[in-house]
Image (tube, rainbow, N blue to C red):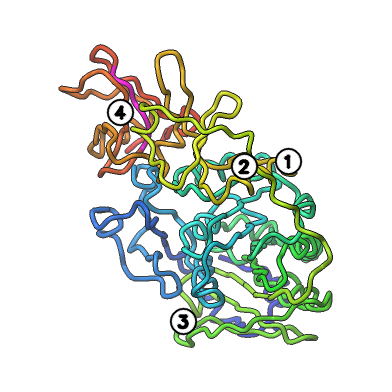
Amino acid sequence: MMLPEAFLDSLSSCTGFNASSFIDAHQNPAATSVRFNPIKYTDNSTFLRELKSGDIPWCKHGIYLKERPRFTLDPLLHAGVYYVQEASSMFLHFLIEHILPDAQNLKVLDLCAAPGGKSTLLSSMKQFELVVANEIISSRVPVLYENIVKWGTSKTFISNNDPRDFKVLGEMFDVVLVDAPCSGSGLFRKDPNAILEWNSELVEFCSLRQQRILQDAFQVLKPGGYLIYSTCSYSYQENEQNVDYILEKGGCQSIALNVPKEWGVVESSSDHYEGKGYRFYPDKINGEGFFCSVFQKLDSTGSQSLQLPKANHLQSVNSAALTSMVKTEGVKIFEENGILYGVNQPLIEWRTMMQASLKLRKSGVKLGSIMKKGFVADHELAMSELISTHINTIDLKLQDAIKYLRKEDIDVEDVTDGTYLVTHQQTGLGWAKMIRGRLKNNYPISWRITMRED
């Protein structure tokens, strides 16, 4: 892998950069790592157990794998048992535990969320009761939606808005994450084509775009709340320079993290205000390039938070067919435009407020619809933590599970007519309906896999 001289020269003054070892590291393949889902993972997840090579020190749910398997052909990936994520990005877990170890019932906004790695990580943490995963680019919302639905937590909403649209909400979030669009130099080993696209003009363009997003992020952060800024770039202009940009605006302070030295993470300081940043180099850690910095907002920016409306228009729905399939404790179930939804009780008013101001693409769990012939369950319910443990299931072995995910016919024996949750290793994949001895595969057609074993 040939790295551009102009790129290497641009990093020469960056803290912790060593050209020779950095170049050598780029001759080796990137490590493969996954983060398991605490609401779905069990010790019976054979794939993770057999391929594990070590733990990721900064994320208790993250592990390294001995080799990169064909993830697409593993039903547990599609079931949301784990997420394939670069190890350095999982540092967000340590960061949250460091600054908010005992917090609960917080609200976090992930402003640049697609494809959903950091949003699913945040939704697995006890500190948050609401995770808003926002993606400005409409074409990237479907993959974000798919990953959020597969993860299965009921506290994650999805929005499709420009960061400036959130200003109308006022200072409502305890944490705002800006995992900013960047020049991508930290992922050269995983995407060699990015090397061809790198140039100084791209770095400058990204830096200015990041500053605009950061300005909007501060407007919706509570006083005392935390802004987390991260990139997958090595460039000083996108990292420490933007740390100075944030501090120059005033009203916040840089937060230092007590990172164990043996992890190999490099602490840096910005030139003017000595704001702390944390650099990940592939010659120092087992992972890819990453940068993050944390700020605490000290003063209000003057934007008043909206008053929470009463959601009196949401009339609760109860039926024996529905409650036999859904965990209802702490959840409000209601009908909206012919669709039944389940929303965690503490989030009802927040949902109503955000619906009036934002383009919400997911807000709660879409349970299904009540038709003339009874309740028809939605795929979101099949993947969700709200699904009842008493529901009828068909557990498929590996090859049949792959057939199901391809939306192919499956032969099953001694199954009576009715609706079933199709599972693999007792973890939900989707719905199927047995009608007069024939199993109708209801897996979403847009999610079906096309890869073959050969």
Q: Calculate the distance from the C-alpha at mark 1 to the C-alpha at mark 2.
A: 20 Å
Query: Residue 141 shows which numbered tag?
Result: 2
Residue under circle 1? 356
| Residue 385 visible in the current orientation | yes
Q: Calculate the distance from the C-alpha at mark 3 to the C-alpha at mark 4.
A: 46 Å
Most frequent secondary structure within the magenta stretch = strand
Q: Amino acid at mark 3?
A: Trp
- Mark 3 and mark 4 lie on one chain; the one further toward the N terminus is 3
- Mark 1 and mark 4 lie on one chain; the one further toward the N terminus is 1
- Start and end of the magenta stretch? 429-434
Residue under circle 4? 420
**Labels 1, 4: front one:** 1
- The residue lying toward the viewer, choosing from 434 and 204, is 434
- The residue lying toward the viewer, choosing from 326 and 59, is 326
Residue at the image point whose x is 62% and y is 42% from the top: 141
Residue under circle 3? 263
| Callout 3 secondary element | helix
Q: Amino acid at mark 1?
A: Ala
Q: Is residue 76 left or right of residue 360?
A: left
Q: Calculate the distance from the C-alpha at mark 1 to the C-alpha at mark 3.
A: 45 Å
- Mark 1 and mark 3 lie on one chain; the one further toward the N terminus is 3
- The residue lying toward the viewer, choosing from 137 and 108, is 108
| Callout 1 secondary element | helix
